[in-house]
Image: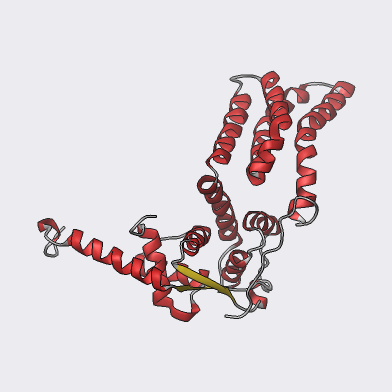
């Protein structure tokens, strides 16, 4: 059976490489020639990191900032009461970042929430009944809501390659 | 603009020359891995090739989409006259640096 490339990794590549999909084609060709899906993922993540670090140092700083915020909040340096306003602040100021480097912004939010969320949810598990349900919903809406507000349009417009933020199609010269 | 190439740029240009007409991402990466014994990220190769193309050292054209690539076209690269001159200049510079170093003479390190 022909191996299929991971859909998420392909979506990530499409976002990073835009309409120039020769790179994705090369990766898929290698996958069909015996490389593993893990190899495919490692290439996709490596490409994302390479682009972030080499093409936009500001974006690299933002990813680092996300890591610091997330890690700091998770291990309790600042506590969750600081993590939430920081994330809200990032959400409010993200329009400029969005215009600067959208992929990095998404990585920033995903990293932040992934690292902070377990800490947020930790004390919910000790609650009972209605409190537990209320605070679970409240924190999910509060935490992922901030991300979701930005991620949903991103997913629709960027991964779908349509809508007002989509980039114009590249002109290909066909034939060698 | 820089007068000489970085080691990675030089490797890629030499790999294109070695591969010949079939020089697209996969054979270029394979050539570097086999010949230079260096593991390379395909994305890094493309980023470097884009830079070389922007500087006029290589040109690229798209082939026909093929099913084994998920319907995607290959991007073939060809070295330009300017690129070939850059390779020769770099080789000359390295050769000059190499010559006259007693530690590098003979087989022992």
Q: Is residue A1 left or right of residue B7?
A: right
Height in image: A43 above or below A105?
below
Q: Residue at x 82, y 31 (%)?
A: A141
Q: Residue furthest right?
A: A130
Q: Position of residue A2 (x, y in %)?
A: 67, 73
Height in image: A155 above or below A18?
above
Whether residue B17 can be seen here: yes
Q: Nearer the viewer, residue A171 or A122?
A: A171
Q: To which quarter of the image does residue A62 belong?
A: top right
Q: Quadrant of the N terminus of chain A?
A: bottom right
Q: Residue at x 40, y 75 (%)?
A: B17
Q: Nearer the viewer, residue A25 or A170?
A: A170
Q: Is residue A134 left or right of residue A1?
A: right
Q: Position of residue A110 (x, y in %)?
A: 68, 39
Whether residue A106 can be seen here: no
Height in image: B31 above or below A76?
below
């Amino acid at each position: 059976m022909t191996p299929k490339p991971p859909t998420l990794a392909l979506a990530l590549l499409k976002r990073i490489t835009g309409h120039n999909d020769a790179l994705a084609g090369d990766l898929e060709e290698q996958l069909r020639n015996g490389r593993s899906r893990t190899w495919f993922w490692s290439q996709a993540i490596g490409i994302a990191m390479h682009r972030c670090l080499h093409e936009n140092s500001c974006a690299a700083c933002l990813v680092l900032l996300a890591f610091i915020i997330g890690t700091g909040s998770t291990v309790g340096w600042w506590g969750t009461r600081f993590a939430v306003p920081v994330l809200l602040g990032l959400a409010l100021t993200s329009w400029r970042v969005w215009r600067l480097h959208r992929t990095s912004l998404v990585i920033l939010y995903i990293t932040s929430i992934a690292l902070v969320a377990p800490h947020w949810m930790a004390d919910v598990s000790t609650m009972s009944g209605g409190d537990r349900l209320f605070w679970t919903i409240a924190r999910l809406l509060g935490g992922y809501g901030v991300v979701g507000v930005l991620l949903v349009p991103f997913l629709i417009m960027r991964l779908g390659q349509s809508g007002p933020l989509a980039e114009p199609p590249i002109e290909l010269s066909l034939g060698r | 603009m820089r007068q000489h190439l970085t080691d990675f740029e030089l490797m890629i240009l030499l790999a294109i020359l070695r591969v010949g007409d079939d020089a697209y991402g996969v054979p270029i990466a394979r050539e570097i891995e086999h010949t230079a014994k260096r593991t390379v990220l395909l994305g890094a190769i493309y980023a470097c090739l884009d830079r070389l193309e922007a500087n006029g050292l290589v040109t690229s054209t798209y082939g026909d989409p093929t099913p084994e690539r998920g319907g995607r076209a290959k991007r073939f690269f060809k070295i330009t006259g300017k690129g070939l001159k850059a390779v020769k200049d770099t080789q000359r510079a390295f050769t000059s640096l190499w010559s006259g170093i007693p530690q590098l003479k003979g087989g022992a390190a």
